[in-house]
Every structure is written in C-alpha cells, then in structure tokens.
Amino acid sequence: MTPLSQPESLLQLRAERCQSCTHCIRVCPTEAIRIRKGKASIMGHRCIQCGLCLTACPHGAWEVRSRELDEIKKVGSPIAFVDPSVLWQGGMNVSPQEVMEGFLKIGFQEAHELNEALIVYRRAIEGYLASGEIPRPAIGSGCPAVIQLVQVKYPALIENLIPLVPPFHIAAAIWEASSGGLKPDGALFYIAPCLALAEAVKDPLFSHPKYAEAINFSKIFNGLRSKIQSKARRNKADSPPALIREGMKWAASGEWIESLSIGKAIVVDGIHHVGAVLDRVENGVLEDIQFIDAWACPTGCFGGPLLIENPHVARSLFKNWGKIKKAAPQAKKFRKTANSFAWETYRLPQILTPRSGMRLDENMGRAMAKLREIDALVKKLPGIDCGSCGCPNCLALAEDIVQGFAGEGDCRYSQGKKKEIAGSNQ
Amino acid sequence: MEEERKSKGAMDLEFKIVGQDFKRAGEASFEVKNCLKRLGAPPKVIRRIATAAYEAEVNVISYAQSGTMRVNIEDEWVDVTVEDVGPGIPDIELAMQEGYSTAPPYVKEMGFGSGMGLPNIKRNSDWMDLRSTVNQGTILRFKVNLKGAEKGEA
C-alpha cells in the first residue's frame, strides 16, 4: 500500500505570498500541510483536495493552476461544460441564462449544463440503492474530496461509496453521443468550482476521455463578468444554452436528492462535519440510513473555493430563481434524451482502493514501535498546539520527528525543546 | 519484562469514561480507531473493533457512574477491557438477548439503549467475556484478531 504516484498537482503555492503563518496547516482535515523552511508544503499522499487551505489562506498563497482565457481562445473550438454552482456568482447580477450566454461571448463555441446528466445520475443513485449491492448507509460519491477522505481516513467505508462517475463525465458522454463528437480542433473544458473537481477532470478513473482539462472559475470570472455586462451579443445563429432546474440543483447539498425514492438520508456538508458523520458510520450506528449526501464544502458546491460569491448568498439566489416554469418544455425533452442512456454504463471503471495516508509504517510491528515513540515524545512537548514548528499540533510534530521529517530543535518553546531532546535520544 | 513485551510490539491505551456524558460518546473509540489506522490494521477489522468499542463505551455512559477502557494490542490481537462502577447486570443471559434493554426513555430518545449493544459486541468480536456484580459494576472483555479471517457478519 505505497501511495499512488501522483501526477503533478494543480494545487500550487505562490511562495512569494506565503507568510509561513499557520492558517492552512490548522484547517487541513488530514494534517497534510507543514511549513518547512518558511513555506507551506503539501504531503501528497495525504491531501484529499478539499481546498480548505485555499479558503483559509489570508494571503492568497494557494492557487489552482489553470489556463487563462487568452489561451483557451487559441483552441479552435473550445466547448464549456459549466458546473451549475458558477451560475450564481457575485457581481454578475444576471440570470443564469445570461451567464451561460456569457461563456459563448468570451469565446466558447458551445456551453452546456449538466441537464440530462443529472437526470441519469439521479436514476443511477436510485438504481444502486435498489440493487442491494451497496452496504448501508450508501455514501454519495459526487464530491471527489469526500471520496478521497474515505480512501485516506475511513477505508472501511469504501464499499459504501456509490461507484459512479461524476455528472460532468456523464454530461460529456451524452453530448458526444448526441452531437456527433468533437471536431478535430475542438476540446472540452469543465468550468470547475473547486480543486477536487478540477483534479477529477484530469483523472482517467473519473473523467471522460474527451475532456482537455478543467478551468478554474475564478481565473475567468472577470472576463466573463465584463462580457456579460457589455452589450456584446452572441452570434444569433447559435442556439441558446439550455437550463433546467433539475440540472442546477446539483450545486446545493441535499436539494438534488429531493423527490428521489431512496428512503432516509443524511445531508452533510463541510469536510469536518463529513468526517464526523463518517466516524459514526464506522461505529456502525447509522445503519438505518439509506443514503448520505456528503459534500466537502459548506452548502455543497456553492461553497467551492474557486467561487467568488458567499455560498449562502449563491444558494439563496438559486432558490429564489423564479423562471423555472419557462424551462418546462425543455425539461421534458431532456428527460426523453436522458432516458435513452442506461445509468449502468456509468459505473466507475475500477474499484476504489484505500490510500495509506494515515499509516505510520508498512510493517505493523514497526508502526507500533513508532506509535509508542510518538506517545512518549508528545508527552514531553508543551501541548499548546501553537503551530510555530510548522506542524498543525504537538502530536503531529512528535509524529514527524519519529518519521524523520522534523528535527529535534523544531519546537520553539525552550521547555518543550529541552524535554523533547531528552526524550528523542534514541 | 515490560520492556521485552514492548520490544515484541505491544501497545497499551487507556481511556476514562464518565457516566451520563453523552456529549463525549465516541471519543474513546475514536482514539482506538485512530491508533489502529496508524498501525495499518485491515479496514474491516477496524470497523469491527470500532463498532464493538463504541457500543461498550456507550454502555458505560448510559448505565454506569464511571468506567475505564483499556486497549491492549499484542500478538495480532486487540484486547479490550471495559470496567465500570455502576449498577451491574443482574441477568447476563437476558442482557445478551437482542432487543432486551433496561435503558430509561431519555437514553432511548438519544438513539442509544436499543438492546443491541451487547449482542453487537459479541457479533463483532472473536471472543467475549462479561462479568458483573450487582451494585458494584461490570467487566466486559473482548478480543478481535487483527489478521484473523472475517467473522460472519450476518
């Protein structure tokens, strides 16, 4: 169980902005960040891509790599698949329809929502729950950060995850089948609200092969806003991008499962709350629950770290959106298209496996020896969890010392330092 | 001798449990789980121990005044002893029956005391022993094999 070799992460540190403060190391749910030599760095085998570090940094030092608008325009026929959460972003003050049209104005040939894909996805959830294949409670796998949290911290619950590809994959598959495919100079892009989805677009396990990459929404926000507000018109020949409420509900935790016949469900958002619920599932106390709709970000994807608007405001804007009825005829059409796609096709191509992020050693005997050393060492540290050493807390420092990642002199408190040196003399 | 035991790879953990402290229910079993994850125990074994340890912890909180959970990991066995000071169990055979519960309504309202705790511990462990003295307390001990074959979950 060695960590999978990870392709270069989209998450990058702008070192010049990092003040070596301790905000990010403290919020990380898997304690994957350390400050080393004055700069934050990530232990890839533990990172679950939740993006809390991005939100926590007061200096904007964490960044999700992505192409700028100018580069995207160089692609002959770029096609955007738009995460519904980006339709309600601050400063735009326009209808979601206009935002979708905005994507055409800034240079995309087509812009699509998740419409049919979400209909298929919802049917798949019902299908998996009816099949009896998944132990209860089944855990939704729509949020890739939640999947990784399970892999790293709750490996016993992997079998509870619904083995489905994400809706952006299904959307591309439906588009490909209905449109005749990609032009030679074309490329699909996913407009992503978060790191986890952007990474999922790169990952062949989750993604559709026609995707070129994801676009960090915050990087194109200004360009999009200025085009929407200017009077530029889209080409009249283009058909307007279609929207239905059903597809957009995906952005809000819990809402997209309303009206599904799946029995008792728990809706949980915010990665630390998700962890707390999974902890209870692990204890075997939530077995009467059929489905857990779990999202790393508060309120669901509206809380994505690459979005601009406050998630609660965005969610309310969506809920107050009044033009639902107009979309009804389209909804009918979408349902018809969706029904011609079998949800069984969208099973994850591989079984998910545990990640060894929390494991101290491959050998259990050695792990036990390390655990004992850590236990002895932590008692000698000051226990104030100040973070000055670059670790999120004293326990993490003790662990890093035992693993050889940290030095004996890293604790700044002389009392702790003295005792720690005495204790690690072995 | 202690040193020799430890050099062979033994590990002891101890947690205090306070009666009626429902707010902290799960903290001891959380620590046990965390430790097993650090050691790289197989996920299914972790889940079995978690379930059993959590039930045992909740039992102390629901019925007893106070208790201690001692966890010993040695020779591929996780050995858990939960000892409490409390009312004790008058009829152990009856207490082991599924659905039998003496929990007061307020405990049941919190989702505990469904009478599945002890049977659940038995189901999720490879060995279990329960002794009790009325008006003194209860000693529950169970073992789970870290590498052993999966015990039938049905």
Image: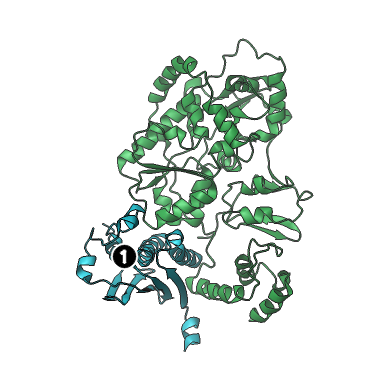
Question: Helix or strand or loop: what does disc 1 sit on?
Answer: helix
Give coordinates of residue A1: x percent, y percent: 50, 60
Q: Residue furthest top?
A: A236
Q: Is residue A188 visible?
A: no
Model colouring = by chain
Type of amino acid at the residue the image marks with label 1: Ile
Left or right for A221, reference A260: right
Q: Where is A68 relative to A298, above or below?
A: above
Q: Nearer the viewer, residue B58 or A421?
A: B58
Please give the chain letter of the residue carrying mark 1.
B
Chain letter for the part of the structure drawn in green? A
* Outermost residue, bottom side: B1
Query: Is A314 situated left or right of B13 in this image?
Result: right
Q: Which residue is drawn at 46% across and 37% down?
A: A254
According to the image, label 1 marks what residue? B121
Residue A115 in picture, x, y percent from top left: 48, 25
Residue A114 position, x and y percent, is 51, 28
Vertical arrangement, residue A21 with respect to residue A315, above or below: below
Can residue A94 be seen here? yes
Q: Quadrant of the C terminus of chain A?
A: bottom right
Return the residue nearer the eye: A24 or A168.
Answer: A24
Which of A205 and A309 lies nearest the eye of the viewer? A309
Asked where in the image residue A25 lies, by quadrant, the reply is bottom right
Give the quadrant of residue A36: bottom right
> Could you say which chain is coloured cyan in the image?
B
Q: Residue lying farthest right?
A: A16
Q: As drawn, is A36 to the left or to the right of B47?
A: right
Q: Where is residue A343 in the image (x, y as percent from the top left)?
A: 39, 33
Few, some or many C-alpha atoms within 10 Å of disc 1 (few <14, some 14-19, many ≥20)? Answer: many
Look at 51% across and 67% down and name the residue there: A362
